[in-house]
Every structure is written in C-alpha cells, then in structure tokens.
Amino acid sequence: MIKLMPGLAAAGLVLSLMSTSAFAAPAGSTPDNTRAPAQIVRVAQMPKYVKPQFKRKKVRLVTTEVAGTVIIDTNNKYLYLVEGNNRATRYGIGVGRDGFGWSGIVKIGRKAEWPAWTPPAEMRRREAAKGHIIPAFQEGGEDNPLGARAMYLYQGGRDTIFRIHGTNQPWTIGLNMSSGCIRMMNEDVMHLYDRAPVGTKVIVIGPGNKQGKVAFEDRGIDVLRTMFGG
C-alpha cells in the first residue's frame, strides 16, 4: 500500500491553508454541479502564475506503455497522457511536499466534477496544532481546493486517498506543495478528465520506486503536431 502566502483577510488565510492538501469527499458525496465553470477556468488561465515549461504541450514520448496510460513524473513535475506512436500530451503538475511524496501503480477508480472536499481527521489535527482551523467539509466550487475536477486513485480496489485534481492556486504548479495529491491547472485537469476514463492505469514515479521499471523518454515538443494539430 502506498503511503502562499496567506491573504491579509481571514478568508484568504483559510483558503491558502486548505489548498496545501488535496483530499476529496468520500464516494457517497454529491458533487456541486451548479457553479459556473467559466469562473474557475479564468482563474487557472492566468499566465503570469505558471512558468512556460509547465503549460500543456504535445510532446514526443518514447515509451513501452500503451496508449491511454497516465505516467506521472513527480521529480520533474510532469504528467503524461500516452497517446501511442511516440506521442503524448504533457501537463505541468504540483506534487507532494517533503515527506508526502509516493510512488506506485494505481488506477482511476472514480471521477467527479466540481468535487466537494472532506479533509481527513489527521490533517485537521495536524493543522490545528499549528493554529490553522480547517473546515470538516467544503462544497465544490470556485473556492474549493480540489478545483474543477477530481480523479480518485485506487489500488487493489481500494481508495488510496490520493487524487489527481484541479487547483484554485495555479501558481503552485511546478512546486512541491501538496499532501501527496497531484494538482493541475483547472483547464488542464478538465482536458485530462475528458480523456482518462475510470479504469485508466496511472503510474506514479516518485520516492520508493514502488512503481517498478518504467521505460519512457521525453524528447521534447512535437513541432508538427503543435503547428498543424493531430
């Protein structure tokens, strides 16, 4: 089994603290589908917050993994959606901070739009000891740390408590900020969500090498596909 600065206002402080983790509601929770997607996408598209190397790109990826597989390279802060024929879409990601990294082979067990957030009791106790009060539950929406979409990672049929999800803090992409979840810009997590169904194999490369041997080589931008599509 695998194991911002705060704003001046109190609301800004709470939001910043909540976004240092990425845990979602249990399977019985109902996502809030009433929020306006345009608002969240607009937050994620602010280019000044994201370094150019972490923008979504079509790349040449040599790998033995089959099309449809997701490879997450937590060391270099990239997530790849393998497309076959040495092609992939590469996304920039934020990953676990020191002590919260992990590795393994998992699957997308379920998915949710505008997911609610239920932080685990351990996290609430840990933050409370620092004087940070985190709510026991937060509805999905613009201010939710899980962003626009969440893909819940399972291993052996059980929820690992780790997720691939959006974020309302796009400036954290490329950093080690989370409690183990994989965060993406909202526009990117929506793009991946539409292309990675439940059951998708996800290989997480990180501390411990529990993912085993994974052969892949990022050979950079696929210029022809970038210019002409396909």
Image: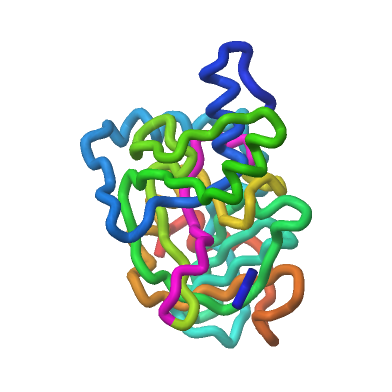
- Lateral position of residue 142 relative to residue 119, left or right: left
Q: Residue at x 67, y 28 (%)?
A: 131
Front-lying residue, 93 or 31: 31
Q: Residue at x 61, y 71 (%)?
A: 204
Q: Quadrant of residue 64?
A: bottom right
Front-lying residue, 187 or 89: 187
Q: Residue at x 72, y 59 (%)?
A: 76
Q: Which region of the structure is painted magenta?
A: 157-172
Q: Is residue 12 visible from the viewing direction of this image?
A: yes
Which residue is outermost to the top?
Answer: 8
The image shows residue 134, relative to residue 195, as above or below, that is above
The image shows residue 32, relative to residue 190, as above or below, that is above
Q: Quadrant of residue 68?
A: bottom left
On whether residue 167 falls in the magenta region, the answer is yes
Residue 193 image point, x, y percent: 37, 58
Q: Quadrant of residue 117?
A: top left
Residue 154 image point, x, y percent: 46, 72
The image shows residue 54, relative to residue 65, as above or below, that is above
